[in-house]
Amino acid sequence: MTLAGLLVQLLNGLAEAATLFLVAAGLSLIFGVSRIVNFAHGSLYMLGLYVAYSLAERYGATALGFWGSVLLAALAVGVLGALVEMLLLRRIYRAPELFQLLATFALVLVINDAALWLWGAEDLLGRRAPGLGGAVEILGRAYPVYNLVLIALGPLVLGLLWLLLARTRWGMLVRAATQDRAMLSALGVNQAWLFTSVFALGAMLAGLGGALQLPREPASLSLDLRVIGEAFVVVVVGGMGSIPGAFVAALLIAEIKALCVALGTVSILGVAVEFPRLTLVVEFLFMALVLVFRPWGLFGKPQGASRGTAPIEAPLRPASRRLRLAALALFAVLAALPLLAHSHPYAVILMQDVLVAALFAASLHFMMGPGGMHSFGHAAYFGLGAYGAALLLRGLSLPMEAALLFGPLAAALGALVFGWFCVRLSGVYLAMLTLAFAQIVWSVVFQWDAVTGGSNGLIGLWPSAWLSAGPAYYYLTLALVAGSVLLLRRAVFSPFGLALRASRDAPLRALAIGVPVQGVQWAGFVIAGLFAGLAGSLFAFSKGSISPDALGIGKSVDALVMVLLGGIQSLAGPLAGAAAFTTLQDEIMRATDYWRALFGAVILLLVLLFPQGLAGAAGQLGRLWRGLAAAGGPR
């Protein structure tokens, strides 16, 4: 590594930091005021790049046309952000925070398919900026002039945001809203328009960040999820709601990644370490390190309890006799389903997928509902269970039955290690630490070719001969899933479950009466990881293979959507959500190429109509029906 090469890589890091800061600053603004974790922020970045491409192809031959296209694209995305806030988010501000996250995830699906319809599936590389297409020489190395412009834009935008927030009345109101929204409303401030303006500004910054990448990277449909992961990391490391923190975090993360590229392969104690491969996960390693030692980020502050949000949840109640009979009837129907295999052969395959998804969702619900621990990385334990079973079968040549039994212990071990750190945090910071650990595990699996098969995964993971005949594996899956769900329900109403709920609702009071809060939460974390690992093991043998996608962000999001769709306040919620999610996804994918948009629209409709989830809505309808029946009975 030469000095010139190192300097060029560090300059590349500064240019990347400018883009990261633009996206993260908008995300931080939106969270600071509205307390919404906007999962669609990466989609706004992607739209900014696509709109800038279309405008620049038509008007970008001159410098004025190119920069006008960039600014117009940012403004267009800002207007779209304002419309999203007014038409959708404004209606769900009083819903539980996680349902707001579910709504923004649905927007990701809709926007992605809208971009597919408008611009197609091919990557689109934009034109160079007129007058900035050349390079300057730095220590004998050519360096793009456009990157230098980006480097200058980062501090410029930071300064403009500081002036806006510190020297204007609007900025004063925004800072007040981040501290106490209830008091701001009591003073007569129109919060609706304040929130709209903040969301529009945040969206415009994301759109600007995307539009500025026009000469540097092609517009692609995969940008939304990639960018939102990086932006979340920057915001959390810097401190939620801190603009200077986002700037410093973007600089640190981008420069660390650039340094990894510059170092190349280095021999340490005789072991060759390929630092460029760390770029897949180094930001998550850094985030985990920061959160372990500074739980609120570099510039953040502990979050106080927000007022005027969702109502307090009703306490969980044991199943009534009617509900237990309904569960037995459902089990009987599922047991009889293979009898229809001749006329409906796909029904058994689909139901097997539903059962695995239901166990995965139930394990996450145990952590999030009774445990109150939000997780964005639950797929880590699903994947560890799947790979644990696969490696026991192929590496140690254990029988399939033993691999299925002991495979989930790998997930429990991972949860034991990661949970020790995670239970010391709460809220968004806890969720992001779970995501960091999940991405670390994914990176190891993705790059450890000799053991895990790398990106190709492992194949040939079929059940034993006696389980491969007819519906035998389906019945095994049904029995294990039903037994696991019953065990999780029993755990919720056991003394341990009561202590877990007490630790969620009133940790200080729980400590005062002798409940070891962190120890109880840690145990709950491990139990959730164990059953997620069992779901992963069942999944691996049902499909005959396993790949790193089982540990990816998308899989964690699927579990989160299933829990929220069914309703986090109900023990039946994750089961209903898993059934609805898996069935809808399967049917819609077969019905249209634009299945994401249709699926997202269905999720949005359910969020608006049933903010308590499917199980909560069913419970409300049942109570309403019983009330009407009682009112119409004999007097």
Image (cartoon, rainbow, N blue to C red):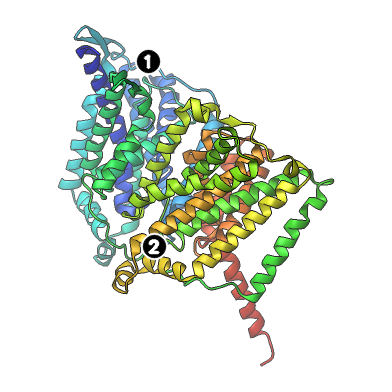
Q: Is residue 484 above or below residue 594?
A: below
Q: Is residue 6 above or below residue 290?
A: above
The residue type indicated by label 1 comes to: Ala
Residue 140 in the image, given as x and y percentages of width and height:
21, 6
Q: Is residue 502 above or below residue 21?
A: below
Q: Which residue is mark 2?
A: 520
Q: Looking at the image, can residue 453 be seen?
A: yes
Residue in view at x 31 percent, y 30 percent: 19
- Answer with mark 1 or mark 2, whichever residue precedes in sequence: 1
> Would residue 137 be found to the left or right of residue 326 on screen?
left
Residue 335 lies in quadrant: bottom right
- Residue most extreme to the left: 167
Residue 499 lies in quadrant: bottom left
The C terminus is located in which quarter? bottom right
Residue in view at x 62 percent, y 59 percent: 483
Q: Is residue 287 above or below residue 603?
A: above
> Would residue 184 be found to the left or right of residue 432 on screen?
left
What is the crowding at mark 2: few (fewer than 14 residues within 10 Å), some, or many (at least 20)? some
Q: Secondary structure at mark 1?
A: loop
Q: Looking at the image, can residue 47 be seen?
A: no
Q: Nearer the viewer, mark 1 or mark 2?
A: 2
Q: Which residue is mark 1?
A: 61
**Nearest the camera: 582 or 604?**
582
Residue 147 in the image, given as x and y percentages of width and height:
27, 20
Residue in view at x 29 percent, y 51 percent: 32
The residue type indicated by label 2 comes to: Val
Determine whether label 1 and label 2 are within 8 Å by CB. no
Residue 526 in the image, given as x and y percentages of width and height:
44, 54
